[in-house]
Image: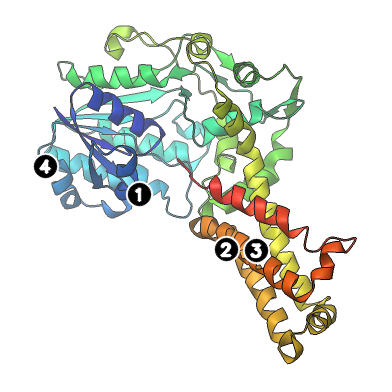
C-alpha cells in the first residue's frame, strides 16, 4: 500500500517510514524540510508537509492523492520559533481529517502520547487531547496510539536529555517530578503501526503502547547510565523550583530556534504519570513489547552513544559561553578598553586607521556572538568565529609578533577559541 507518513523526518516518523519501506510499502514521506531529509532516506517519495501551511482541507489534496493510509507522527512540545501547538495539533489535523473524509484514505493512525490530558495543565497536553477528540469524532477508520517513553538507538529532544542526565559527572540528577514510565522499544511501536495498517477494519480504537516494566525516573537514568558503561553514581534529587530558571532559559531558547528539551512544559509533563497501561497484544496487532531491561541488553551502547550523552549538556554550555565571550570582547573594546585598544593598534602600525579597525573588530565580535545564539545562524556564526580568529592571529602576528611571548598569551589564547568554535560547528546537526 502507499502510506503517507507525516513527520517522517522526526524521531518516531523516520523509524516508521523506514520500517514501512522495508516491508515493501510505498512511503510518501511528509516533512517541513524535505530536501534535507531526502539526503538521509533517498528511497522515500518526499513531499513538503508543514502543518502551518495545511490549515484547509484543500491544502491536502495533492498530498493525499493515491494514498491508502496516513500515519501522523507530527507533534511539538511547546510554541516557539517555527513551532505552533495550534497548527500541529488542531488546525492541521482538523484539515487533514476533513480532507480524508472527503476523498482521501479511510484509515488514519495517529501517534499521540501517554499523559495527554488537561490535568497536566500544559498547552501540550490540552492540544494533543484536542487532536484525539477531533479524530474520535470523525467518520474515519482511526487508531490512536499513546506510547510511553520510546527507546531507540538514536535520540532527540527529551530522550537525548535523559541520556545527558544519565551521563552527568559524579551524580545522577533527577529533575523535578516523580512520574513513572513504561518504556517501549521503537521497533515494537513501528511493528504495531505496520500491523495495524494491514489489519481488517474498522478499528476505531485508542490504546496505550507501554512496555511491561514500570521504571521510575531515577531507575530510568541509572539504567541508562549503566547501559552507557559509566560507573554507578548516587542519585541526587533536584527540586523543580531549582531547575525552573533553566527551564525558562529553555523557553527563551525555543523562541530563538533551539528546541530545548528542558522547558517548563517538560517539567510539568515529567511530574505527571506517563507510564500508561499495557494493552492486550490483540489490540496491538499481536505485538508484545519488550521490557526496558531487555532493550538495554539487546542494544549495547557504543562509544558514539557515550560521546553524544556527554555532549548533550556540554554543547549548549559551550554555545552559551562562546557567544558570551565574543560579545564581551566587543563590549570591552568599545567601552572600558577603547583607549587601550586604539593605542595597541597604533603601536602595531595602523596609524589613523586604528579607531576604525578597533570599532570594526568589536562590532564583528558582538555580531558573531549574538548570531551564535540564534539557531538559524549558529553553524555559520561558529565558522565565522574560527575564520575571524584566524584572521586576527595572522594580522596580529604580522604587526605585533612579540605578543606571542607575552605572559598573558593574547595570541596563544586565540587558538583554543578557534578550536572550540570548530567543535561547535562540527556538532551543528540537530537530527
Gap in angstroms between the C-alphas marked 4 and 1: 22 Å
Q: Which mark is residue 390?
A: 3
Label 2 to label 4, Cα distance in Å?
45 Å
From the viewer's side, name the closer residue of 144 and 231.
Answer: 231
- How far apart in space, not on screen, are marks 2 and 3 (Cα)? 10 Å
Q: Nearer the viewer, mark 2 or mark 4?
A: 2
Query: Which sits earlier in the primary sequence, circle 4 or circle 1?
Result: 4
Placement of 164 over or under 406, stated as above or below = above
In this picture, residue 362 sits left or right of residue 332: left
Badge 2, how many Cα within 10 Å: few under 14, some, many 20+? many
Q: Nearer the viewer, mark 1 or mark 3?
A: 3
Q: Which residue is under mark 2?
A: 384
**Secondary element at tag 4:** loop
Picture quadrant where residue 427 is located: top right
Disc 3 on helix, strand or loop?
A: helix
Sequence-wise first label, 1 or 2: 1
Q: Which residue is mark 4?
A: 65
* Residue on which disc 1 sits: 87
Amino acid at each position: 500500500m502507499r502510506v503517507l507518513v507525516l513527520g517522517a523526518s522526526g524521531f518516531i516518523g523516520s523509524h516508521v517510514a523506514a520500517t514501512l519501506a522495508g516491508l515493501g510499502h510505498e512511503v510518501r514521506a511528509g516533512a517541513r524540510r524535505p530536501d534535507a531529509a531526502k539526503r538521509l532516506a533517498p528511497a522515500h517519495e518526499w513531499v513538503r508537509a508543514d502543518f502551518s501551511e495545511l490549515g484547509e482541507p484543500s491544502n491536502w489534496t495533492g498530498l493525499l492523492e493515491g494514498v491508502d493510509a496516513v500515519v501522523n507522527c507530527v507533534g511539538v512540545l511547546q510554541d516557539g520559533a517555527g513551532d505552533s501547538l495550534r497548527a500541529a495539533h488542531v488546525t492541521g489535523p482538523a484539515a487533514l481529517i476533513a480532507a480524508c473524509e472527503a476523498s482521501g484514505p479511510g484509515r488514519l493512525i495517529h501517534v499521540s502520547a501517554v499523559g495527554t490530558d488537561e490535568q497536566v495543565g500544559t498547552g501540550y497536553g490540552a492540544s494533543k487531547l484536542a487532536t484525539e477528540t477531533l479524530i474520535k469524532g470523525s467518520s474515519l477508520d482511526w487508531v490512536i496510539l499513546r506510547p510511553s517513553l520510546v527507546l531507540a538507538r538514536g535520540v532527540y529532544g527529551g530522550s537525548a536529555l535523559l541520556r545527558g542526565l544519565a551521563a552527568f559527572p559524579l551524580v545522577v540528577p533527577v529533575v523535578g517530578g516523580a512520574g513513572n514510565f513504561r518504556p517501549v522499544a521503537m521497533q515494537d511501536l513501528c511493528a504495531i503501526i505496520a500491523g495495524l495498517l494491514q489489519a481488517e477494519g474498522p478499528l476505531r480504537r485508542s490504546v496505550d503502547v507501554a512496555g511491561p516494566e514500570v521504571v521510575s525516573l531515577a531507575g530510568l537514568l541509572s539504567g541508562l547510565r549503566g547501559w552507557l558503561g559509566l560507573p554507578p553514581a548516587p542519585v541526587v534529587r533536584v527540586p523543580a523550583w531549582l531547575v525552573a530558571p533553566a527551564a525558562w532559559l529553555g523557553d527563551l531558547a525555543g523562541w530563538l530556534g533551539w528546541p530545548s528539551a528542558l522547558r517548563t512544559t517538560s517539567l510539568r509533563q515529567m511530574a505527571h504519570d506517563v507510564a500508561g497501561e499495557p494493552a492486550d497484544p490483540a489490540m496491538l496487532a499481536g505485538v508484545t513489547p519488550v521490557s526496558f531491561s531487555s532493550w538495554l541488553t539487546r542494544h549495547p551502547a557504543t562509544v558514539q552513544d557515550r560521546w553524544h550523552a556527554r555532549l548533550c549538556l556540554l554543547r549548549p554550555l559551550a554555545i552559551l559561553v562562546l557567544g558570551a565571550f565574543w560579545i564581551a570582547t566587543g563590549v570591552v573594546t568599545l567601552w572600558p578598553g577603547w583607549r587601550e585598544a586604539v593605542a595597541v593598534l597604533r603601536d602595531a602600525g595602523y596609524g589613523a586607521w586604528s579607531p576604525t579597525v578597533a570599532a570594526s573588530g568589536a562590532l564583528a565580535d558582538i555580531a558573531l556572538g549574538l548570531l551564535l545564539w540564534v539557531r538559524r545562524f549558529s553553524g555559520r556564526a561558529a565558522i565565522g568565529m574560527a575564520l575571524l580568529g584566524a584572521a586576527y592571529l595572522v594580522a596580529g602576528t604580522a604587526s605585533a609578533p612579540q605578543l606571542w611571548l607575552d605572559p598573558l598569551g593574547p595570541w596563544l589564547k586565540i587558538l583554543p577559541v578557534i578550536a572550540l568554535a570548530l567543535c561547535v560547528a562540527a556538532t551543528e546537526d540537530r537530527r
